[in-house]
Image (spheres, helix red, strand yellow):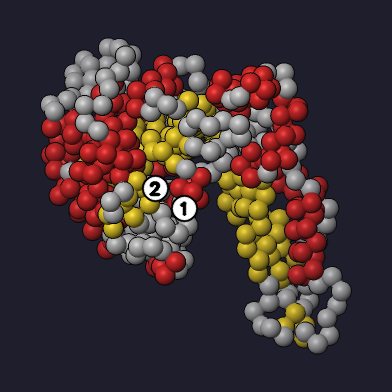
Amino acid sequence: MLSSPAAVSAAALGRAAAPKLARLLTYRTVSSRVPEEVETEQFEAFIAALPELFPRVSAALQLERVNGFGLLYRWPGTPGGTASGRGPAVLMAHYDVVPVEDPDRWDYPPFAGTVTETSIEGRGALDDKGALAAVLEAAEQLLAEGFAPAGDIYFSFGNNEETAGDTAAAAAALLAERGIRPWLVLDEGGAVASGAFPFVTVPLAVVGVSEKGILDVELAVDDPGGHASTPNRMGAPAGRARAVVRLDRRPFPASLPDVSVEMVQRLSGSAPLLPRLVLGNAAHLRGALTRVFGLLGGEPNAMTRTTVAVTQLRGSKGSNVLATRATANANIRVAVGETVASTVARLRSIIRDPQVGLRVVEGNEPSPVSATDNAQFALLEETIRTCFPDAVPVPYIMLGGTDARRFTSICDAVYRFAPFRMSAADRASIHADNERLGIETFGEGIAFYKVLMGAL
């Protein structure tokens, strides 16, 4: 049985550490695919603040920079301390953030790091500086208590996760070069979510065991162009529009993967009687549940299929000039069981137009599925039950992407879970306005990492 962190309340833990996270939120560490748009001095200032905020970590752990601004800490384990069979563990987070569209829509300035009576406000509070600060604060407190881990613990903090950058890949490659194969990798992803599933009122601690692939495909139609006063039918924009409409009208086929079936069965015990009977027999009612999830739309629908979202349209540069080339970017989340190649082939069959060219801009395959019947997942479950006794731990396939996928080549047990309670409104604030992390919620996250690291 893991030791409980109840001796110090989560609210007290969060309140004491809130100024540290608030300070980290003041740095405008916005990542961009355009190097000139990255304020490198802000990243340097963020890194320089860490020894001041977490002096014990700075003194006891070895730090090296990876790929410029990535941070890889090593907390050396006790010699001979891995006799239990547990090897090194990697705890991940990222400190880059997405841009702020309109600061005037925020209740508090997004880069001010405001601490209220109940929350820490600012861009990155949830995604993902909150987790980074919770990891470091947990280590800071464990060091103050004289704790030494049995095996090596690594902290891998990325600087370009939001742009699907290469820092996490470089960190994984560095560990591989040194012959290090982690026993466990834990990154952001799931959370202790309320209101996440119909008929279930208790919080669900959703742990990502895989994540969908991410694929950007450019649809392009070429045309001779000309003056807008003499247009031709089915010019480049019209051909592109027809392709987009066909993609919208013909979604990819739906199915309920084994991980989702296990998720549904695990949460069935927390549902009322009639839904419990249905959800508890998910393996036998897979087809019917797949159809129901599709009808629910949103997240339930996305759990069942590869999704296609057209996110960018480009055409003529002049208002009175016919486009010689019209493009659309399709951002696709590839379901587990599909591949980038099979997805592109299906796009071609849906569009059914040889005039529409398809170009893969960037593509990543779905991640391998990590087990739920191993010692690593059992440790996460036990830690969740210790720190969040009212929550039901369930596995799921992440719909978004994380840096964790870069580590699947060196570790078979890669999971995605941020130990924070998140309501539907909290989840909606990620990448949106008024991102915030509750002070007590922050404290619960610190307690989670303390318990987890204490068991490694």
Of mark 1 and mark 2, the one earlier in the sequence is 2
The N terminus: image quadrant: top left
Mark 2: few/some/many CA within 10 Å (<14, 14-19, 20+): many
Query: Residue 373: which disc?
Result: none
Could you say which is closer to the camera, residue 353 or residue 195? 195
Q: How far is mark 1 from mark 2, CA to CA?
A: 9 Å
The spot of residue 11 in percent (x, y) is: 27, 39
Q: State the residue at coordinates (61%, 28%).
A: 260
Above or below, 296 against 125 in this view is above
Q: Is residue 152 visible?
A: no
Could you say which is closer to the camera, residue 423 or residue 310? 423
Q: State the residue at coordinates (38%, 63%).
A: 107
Mark 1: few/some/many CA within 10 Å (<14, 14-19, 20+): some
Q: Amino acid at mark 2?
A: Leu
- Outermost residue on the front side: it is 273
Query: Residue 429: which disc?
Result: 1
Q: State the residue at coordinates (19%, 30%).
A: 142
Q: Amino acid at mark 1?
A: Ser
Q: Is residue 395 visible?
A: yes
The spot of residue 311 in percent (x, y) is: 62, 59
The spot of residue 378 in percent (x, y) is: 42, 18
> In this rendering, would 13 be left or right of 401?
left
The spot of residue 146 in percent (x, y) is: 12, 26
Residue located beneath label 2 in the image = 126
Confirm or deny contact between disc 1 and disc 2 (CB under 8 A). yes
Helix, strand or loop status at disc 2: loop
The C terminus: image quadrant: top left
Could you say which is closer to the camera, residue 13 or residue 98? 13
> In this rendering, would 390 be left or right of 451?
right
